[in-house]
Image (spheres, rainbow, N blue to C red):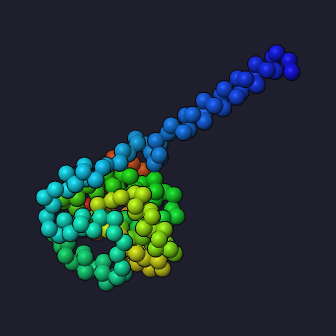
Amino acid sequence: MSRRRTIVTFVCLAALVLIAIGIAELPHGSSGGSPTTRLTAAQAGALLANSPPPLAALHVQGGALLDGGASALKARLATLKGYPAVINKWASWCVPCKEEFGAFQRVSAEYGRRVAFMGIDSEDPKRADARAFLESFPVSYPSYYDPSGHLGVQVTDSSFIPVTVFMPLHGQPFIYQGQIPSANKLREEVKRYALGE
């Protein structure tokens, strides 16, 4: 092999190594925005301390996968009268859902004393997959198990996943189709569409 070819090969290999290192060090779930650092259980607990009882009841069930479908969700919403709500439809097999869950973990803790956060695990055929997902991406609110996808479509008016519904105290719900790209974007949507600020 000629000296020139050896140098070219070395340069190409070095470039590939640098690219691989750069990709490996990209923050997971950043989606081109700022990285979302996960909260520890203690940090989330501190942010949620002294939540009003209806919201505190959600936090006690954080990460739980609940049954009951539409009737259970409707009953829960009735107990949350007087609080805006954010409902996120997700699935364990959904890559954009995984990428946005860090934002939901952080923002639900930041706003959890004023806003009711809930999830709908839609179209997950295996409950075990959904539970494993929630263990990997802990949040301070429960999700309703919806293997058929009917509840998710009923609540979000969409078969798409993920979808987030912002339900203000007054006015019409706002439906956000697709992945919310960052915690900052989710904060903006919560303030604008749930809290009306």
Question: In this picture, is 68 found above or below 45?
Answer: below
Q: Quadrant of residue 45?
A: bottom left
Question: In this picture, is 4 found above or below 184?
Answer: above
Instruction: Please state, as top left, top right, bottom left or bottom right, where the C terminus lies in the image.
Output: bottom left
**Residue at x 28%, y 53% (from the top left corner):** 41
Nearer to the camera, 178 or 110:
110
Q: Is residue 12 visible?
A: yes
Q: Residue furthest top?
A: 3
Q: Is residue 110 visible?
A: no
**Residue at x 37%, y 65% (from the top left corner):** 88
**Residue at x 65%, y 28% (from the top left corner):** 15
Give the x, y percent position of residue 132: 45, 64
Give the x, y percent position of residue 80: 20, 72
Give the x, y percent position of residue 176: 39, 61
Instruction: Please state, as top left, top right, bottom left or bottom right, where the N terminus lies in the image.
Output: top right
Tell me if 48 is positioned left or right of 139 in this view.
left
Q: Quadrant of residue 59?
A: bottom left
Give the x, y percent position of residue 21: 57, 34
Tell me if 9 is positioned left or right of 50 in this view.
right
**Residue at x 33%, y 55% (from the top left corner):** 105
Tell me if 175 is positioned left or right of 196 in this view.
right
